[in-house]
Image: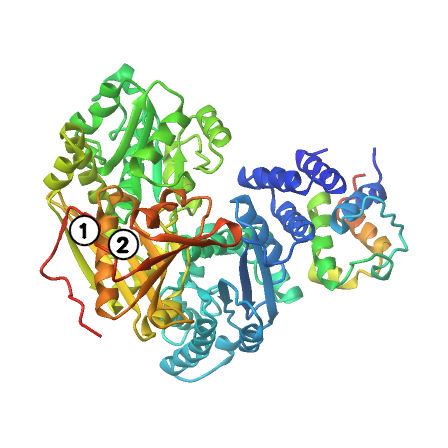
Amino acid sequence: MTSSSELFKQLNALRKAGRIDQALDLLRDALDRNGLDPEEIDRAGHFIQKVRVDGPETTGRLRVNLLGQCTTTWLVPALTAVAWGQGQACWVAEGGYDTILQDLNRLAAEQRAPEVVVLIPWTQRLLGGSGPLGERVEDELTFWRHAWEAAGRMGSRVLQVGYDWVSPGAGGYGLAGEPGSSVELIRAVNAGLRQNRPAGSYFLDLELVSGMMGREAFYDPRRYYWTKQPFSERGLVRLAEHLWAGVRALVTGPKKVLVLDLDNTLWGGVVGETGALGVALGESPDGEAYRAFQKHVKELSKRGIVLAVASKNNPADGLEPFEKNPDMILRLNDIAAAEINWEPKAASIRRIAETLALGLDSFVFFDDNPAEREHVRQAIPEVAVADVPADPADYARALQAGLWFEAASLTDEDRVRAEQYAVERKRRDVQQAAGSMEDYLRSLEMRADVREIDEADLLRVVQLLAKTNQFNLTTRRHSRAEVLRLLALPGAIGMTVRVEDRFGDHGLIGVMLGVPAEEDACILRIDTWLMSCRVIGRTVEEFSFGELLDRARKLGYREIHGAYIPTKKNALVSELYDRMGFQRMRKGDDQAVFYVLDVAAAARPTAYLSLKETSLLVESA
Amino acid sequence: MEDRLDRLTRVFRDVFDDDELQISRQTTAKDVEGWDSLMHVTLVVNVEKAFKVKFTSSEVASLQNVGDLIDLIDARSPAS
């Protein structure tokens, strides 16, 4: 008997005994370890759907609707299983066969819109048409625009899958991309989708996805003629993995931190034995592979992924190659935090999380040693542990296959993040050398740039709303459309806060959104207050609040109401409003605390920041 | 050595999530709860995986009962 049929026997036994949570945990672990084949993943998805007797209103459950021009039936259990393997409970529903606009109308009429709408084109309509290329592309885009508008009105995020070609067609490979060919048409439509898709959407390039597996393996003609579902068993699971990565990119954002081992991960050999110049890094098959892996990792950091090192070595040994080996691609400036010691890796990773002030569930761990990987998997289940193959030549591909860092968009902030973390290390050093906290804060020479939320910042604001967990009073994951709606209310206050100090620029680190209360337009209700953890404890909170207070005063507000809605991650701010001088008004459901502040009596709290001259000043009402 | 029907019964039990399901050569879709055209696809795919065979589109279309399925498996893999 195979171990997977053992798995299902156990799952069914647990289900019969009513131990649903245990069954689901067991299944999640099995799915996370990538041990199941496509038929088993299908079965796993059905199992999950069956045992979750609680409906889609369960907190923390994501609602995802799959709307396709091909059959989507088997994608539902596949996506359910894949998402659960990564710890996310999803309620996945599908629309009808090629009834996308009608399905969107139906969804709009229901009580709660899905968090994500997945739109899956297929080529039957596109290839059945005729006429000049430009017109046919425009026809398809017109259709999808209707779909995007409908999704936007519902407040759902859009995951737009692209078109794909299954074979070169009758022209063969030589003529496949020629004018008038299907492949040319499909590529043109995909380019149109990419350029015109709604802001904040995720584009799933199906040509890339199928290309990676190989179309011969990804598509199954028999399956398509039989069920109008084009994907093979393996293709279906691969697609589900990408859909999950896209959903995650839209809802929580990509993973933020990549923790790397050193020996036989970033270079060949053990640096403690070979010395900094003796590690394999070029000039040999495996040396070249390690260098290529470093290049891939460096590219990741250039687009905003934070790099950290957790290695069992003497600290001096571990750092030496970064400083002395000319073949290293990564340098110390690329590493935001390094724990090089002889302690258990889980302890090092926890320290890294504390140093960076980032949640462990945004971490990915890459280590060539299977024992270390298993240790971290068990000690810190929230950390995503990459499956590392035996050959370093496969490292980059293996890291990519995890799809941890899939993102819907790239902002300028992402691009400078690595540098910012390097600068943060310098600040940490200064802090250790400084006398009192006040001396340190003054020495930073912090300057704040406070502005109203504008079009240019909207993407970044929505990104922050989606992924900020710790310093977030209310954790409202507003979509772009929702933010615009709130800002349009008369008397609404939407602020972005940027901070720089003498070491460098932190960029956009704070968002505050206040709206007039429904019951009384003289009360300002703080809908959202979030901040990047990078600047906590330096009186930026006090300064931001002071700015909000001034604006509220000038607009004629009498009171400010704030709420602290507790989540698993925001205990950090449980007493923030108390510190700002608010009074506790009442308690709500789920331990929520509601606060009130009288504007006339309030004073700006002490802060060690000055306002930059470029900040927009508030005008009177 | 397990015979075809026993092994097939295990596949049916896994696919239909029913530990007590009994099938015979005469069993058709009407006799098993949940055996609709969608489940039929899942069933065929699981049978193919379990017996390491692959049916053509025509063969899939021609299946009327479990007996047909067993005959098809036999034709594809005559050894045992």
Q: Is residue A527 above or below residue A260?
A: below
**Image-based side of A494 in relation to A587, left or right:** left
* Residue for badge 2: A510
Residue A129 image position (x, y, % from top left): 48, 81
Q: How many marks?
A: 2
Question: Please, what secondary structure does the residue beneath circle 2 have?
Answer: strand
Residue at 83% across / 33% down in the picture? Answer: B1
Residue A388 image position (x, y, % from top left): 43, 34
Q: Is residue A468 above or below residue B1?
A: below
Residue at the far bottom: name it.
A131
Work out whether residue B32 or residue A566 is closer to the camera in this orientation and state it.
A566
Chain letter for mark 2: A
Residue A155 image position (x, y, % from top left): 45, 69
Which dot marks residue A576? none
Q: Which corner quadrant of the image does residue B4 belong to?
A: top right
Residue at 80% across / 53% down in the picture? Answer: B69
Chain letter for mark 1: A
Amino acid, disc 1: Val
Of pointers 1 and 2, the one earlier in the residue sequence: 1
- Tell me if I can see residue A194 in this picture: no
Amino acid, disc 2: Gly
Q: Quadrant of the C terminus of chain A?
A: bottom left
Work out whether residue A138 or residue A323 is closer to the camera in this orientation and state it.
A323
Alpha carbons under labels 1 and 2: distance apart: 9 Å
Check disc 2: other Cα within 10 Å, few if <14, some if 14-19, many if 20+: many
**Image-based side of A254 in relation to A445, left or right:** right
* Residue for badge 1: A499
Work out whether residue A121 or residue A383 is closer to the camera in this orientation and state it.
A383
Q: Which corner quadrant of the image does residue A268 belong to?
A: top left
**Image-based side of A543 in relation to A67, left or right:** left
Q: Quadrant of the N terminus of chain A?
A: top right
